[in-house]
Amino acid sequence: MDTRFSVAVHSLILIAKSDIPLTSEQIAASAGVNPSYVRKILTSLRNAGIISAHRGIRGFRMNSDADTLSLLQIYQEVCEQNLTLFDIHQNPNDQCIVGRHIQQVLGDMFKTLEQEMAMKMQEQTLGDCIDAILMREQKSI
């Protein structure tokens, strides 16, 4: 299972809430992943202009407003432009009634589901994630 998206959101929340630039090592320690994995993700986010790193200053800062940065935007920068929830097996037997039609039937259904998911992800922001974490933390105290 690919974790780029969840690690990207985790990283961005940390960066957005920090008063100082955060390094990939600090972020990796929080996310429980390898710093090199975090660096790959942060490179994509930096190339998209969502975060920045400056010469002479170790670490990353937010360039984007968490309240307007959608989860879909994050996904598209670290994963792929088109949201893909499901893959379809490629070699069904066309001598079978199911095999003849399964790719088209599932393809149509999956496309609809992916479009709906993309719309929901566009509505949710990094700020929503931050608010939810802060609310959960407040309840746990």
Image (spheres, rainbow, N blue to C red):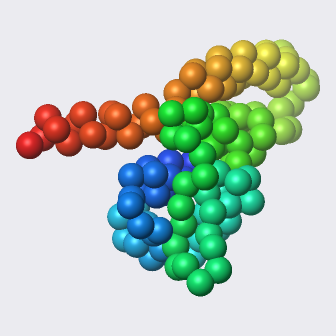
| Residue 60 occupies quadrant | bottom right
How far across and down, in percent of the image, does residue 82 sit?
A: 77, 36
| Residue 105 occupies quadrant | top right
92 relative to 117, above or below:
below
- 126 vs 132, left or right, is right
- 102 vs 134, left or right, is right
Q: In front here: 27 or 105?
A: 27
Asked whether residue 140 appears in the rendered view, the answer is yes
Asked whether residue 34 appears in the rendered view, the answer is no
Q: In front here: 97 or 50?
A: 50
Which residue sits furthest left?
A: 141
Q: Residue at x 35, y 34 (%)?
A: 131
11 relative to 127, above or below:
below
Q: Residue at x 71, y 35 (%)?
A: 84
Tell me the quarter of the image containing the C terminus: top left
Q: Residue at x 53, y 61 (%)?
A: 61
Q: Residue at x 64, y 34 (%)?
A: 72
- 51 vs 98, left or right, is left
